[in-house]
């Protein structure tokens, strides 16, 4: 494992966590409206949306929005069960991010350490009929913090060029 993570490492880690859950059939990323939500075989679905990144001197905070959804019968007879199941899925993902052994695949003998930090409380919001009339689920925003170094020595650039005008 590398000491300093990047966007790709962070996103791949969240996708891996969601994909490891037995009650998630599909994990998607990017613009949610580009996902074909009409396919019934993709549910339960977990979608990861990148909201923004805050860069500080020694850390970067990636802010994501997570959606977990599943199909509801046309007569809504299973809506409460779907809401309960999708809520538990989103709580499971948060639990794995905060405390899961799935993140601890590092080798301390080589000085490797886990470099993802999640130290916030979460607000989880229900939704119904947000994307189509036959899905319901939950969404929440959450930050993942990684260490970073804003070190100009490692930037690939021509340092002989002066850019002050």
Image: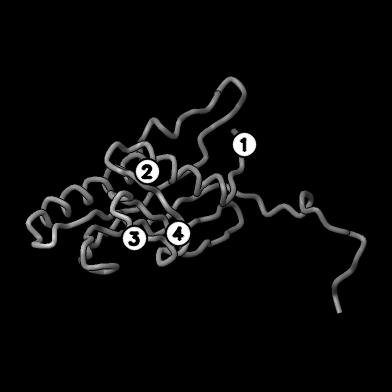
Q: Looking at the picture, does residue 155 appear above or below residue 164? A: above
Q: Residue at x 61, y 43 (%)?
A: 4
User: Do the numbered discs 2 and 4 sit on residues whose CB atoms are within 8 Å?
Assistant: no
Q: Mark 3 points at which residue?
A: 37
User: Do the numbered discs 3 and 1 sit on residues whose CB atoms are within 8 Å?
Assistant: no
Sequence-first tag of 2 and 4 = 2
Q: Mark 2 points at which residue?
A: 18
Sequence-first tag of 2 and 3 = 2
Distance Cα–Cα, label 3 vs label 1:
36 Å
Asked which secondary structure carries label 2, the reply is helix
Nearest to the eye among marks 2 and 4: give it.
Answer: 2
Nearest to the eye among marks 4 and 3: give it.
Answer: 3
Q: Residue at x 24, y 62 (%)?
A: 125
Please tell me which residue lies in front, 98 or 70. 70
Please tell me which residue lies in front, 123 or 102. 102
Asked which secondary structure carries label 4, the reply is strand
Other-residue count near label 4 (Cα within 10 Å), few / some / many at <14 / 14–19 / ≥20: some
Nearest to the eye among marks 2 and 1: give it.
Answer: 2
Residue 42, percent across and down? 33, 50
């Amino acid at each position: 494992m590398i000491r300093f993570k990047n966007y790709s490492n962070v996103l791949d880690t969240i996708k891996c966590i969601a994909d490891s859950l037995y009650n998630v059939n599909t994990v998607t990323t990017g613009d949610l409206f580009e996902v074909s939500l009409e396919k019934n075989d993709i549910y339960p679905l977990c979608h990861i949306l990148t909201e923004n990144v805050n860069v500080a001197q020694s850390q970067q905070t990636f802010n994501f929005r997570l959606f977990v959804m599943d199909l509801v019968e046309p007569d809504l007879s299973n809506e409460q069960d779907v809401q309960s199941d999708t809520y538990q899925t989103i709580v499971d993902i948060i639990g794995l991010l905060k405390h899961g052994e799935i993140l601890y695949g590092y080798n301390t003998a080589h000085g490797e350490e886990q470099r993802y930090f999640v130290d916030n409380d979460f607000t989880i919001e229900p939704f119904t009929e947000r994307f189509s009339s036959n899905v319901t689920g939950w969404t929440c925003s959450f930050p993942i913090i990684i260490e970073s170094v804003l070190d100009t020595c490692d930037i690939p650039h021509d340092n002989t060029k002066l850019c002050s005008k």
